């Protein structure tokens, strides 16, 4: 798995967009970018993933740079319940049967009222 | 919405004792995982399980650990002789059958907090 680098922590005002960056400069061509989050003391939760194109779902948007060396997770209207540790993971996608997740330290996003 | 469940939510045990952590994965899932998270540290992969056998395990998953799917619903993690350093939150996860061109995410349970005294 490619190494990812994320800021240790970020703050965001409630109702504003939260933009969480991730660097993955050594990502290989067939590695996807996955985002999970962990709300305090709970199990991690899948958010979104992408390979080259930008992606959007009901939770968030994922913007991947053209060179794929970095990406940004966007929570368009952050709420207090979005306070969590956000993990960016660069790894092979649907090829293997195991697909273990290798978590880093992630970014602690604090949404303030 | 289907979810992964884990029991107990908190387990306290004496060093050297055996513990069994239980998980009920989502019913149509075929891939099962155990992770652990020591307080204040990263979530770490322990083992993956598919087709009634271990498909991958980490260095943490030594001979003291074992997994089993005793029936069609439960997935268990056994620690034979617990050590102080086994104190952690243990998460079970499950995933659906991999479909070509699609990503099936892992669904995590709420965790079991294991405290070894």
Image (tube, coloured by chain):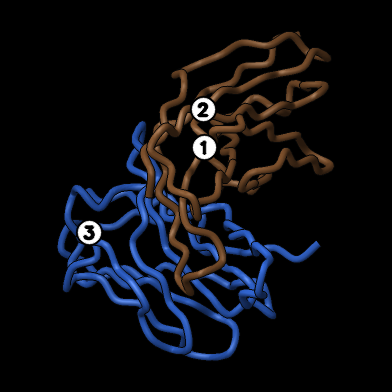
Chain colours: A brown, B blue
Mark on residue A88? 1
User: Viewer-proximal residue, A41 or A25?
Assistant: A25
Chain assignment, label 1: A
> Which residue does the image show at 76% across and 35% down from the upper left?
A60
> Which residue does the image show at 18% across and 49% down from the upper left?
B84
Name the secondary structure under disc 1.
strand
Position of the C terminus of chain A, as image quadrant, is top right
Name the secondary structure under disc 3.
loop
* 1 vs 3, front mark: 1
Mark on residue B60? 3
Q: Tell if the residue under mark 1 belongs to the same chain as the one under mark 3.
A: no
* 3 vs 2, front mark: 2
Up-down relation of residue A11 to residue A93 (above or below): above
Mark on residue B117? none
In 3D space, how far apart are the residues under numbered discs 1 and 2 (Cα atoms)?
Answer: 6 Å
Residue denoted by label 2:
A22
Chain assignment, label 3: B
- Taking the image as shown, residue B91 lies to the left or right of residue B108, namely left
**Of the image marks 1 and 2, the number of the one nearer the N terminus:** 2
User: Viewer-proximal residue, A62 or B74?
Assistant: A62
> Which residue does the image show at 62% across and 27% down from the upper left?
A72
């Amino acid at each position: 798995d490619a190494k990812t680098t994320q800021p240790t922590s970020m703050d965001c005002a409630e109702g504003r967009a939260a933009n969480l960056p991730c660097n993955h400069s050594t990502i290989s061509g067939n590695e996807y970018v996955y985002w999970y989050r962990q709300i305090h003391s709970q199990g991690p939760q899948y958010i979104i993933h992408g390979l080259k194109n930008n992606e959007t779902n009901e939770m968030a948007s994922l913007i991947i740079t053209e060179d794929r060396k970095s990406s940004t997770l966007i929570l368009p209207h952050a709420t207090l319940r979005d306070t969590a540790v956000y993990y960016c993971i660069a790894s092979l996608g649907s090829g293997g049967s195991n697909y273990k997740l290798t978590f880093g330290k992630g970014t602690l996003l604090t949404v303030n009222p | 919405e289907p979810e992964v469940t884990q029991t107990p939510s908190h387990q306290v045990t004496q060093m050297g004792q055996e513990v069994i952590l239980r998980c009920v994965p989502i019913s149509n899932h075929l891939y099962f995982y155990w992770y652990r998270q020591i307080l204040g540290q990263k979530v770490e992969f322990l083992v993956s399980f598919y087709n009634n056998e271990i498909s991958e395990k980490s260095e943490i998953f030594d001979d003291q650990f074992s997994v089993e799917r005793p029936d069609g619903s439960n997935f268990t993690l056994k620690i034979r002789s617990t050590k102080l350093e086994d104190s952690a939150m243990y998460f079970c996860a499950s995933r659906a059958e991999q479909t070509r061109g699609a990503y099936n995410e892992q669904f995590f349970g709420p965790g079991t907090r294991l405290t070894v005294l």
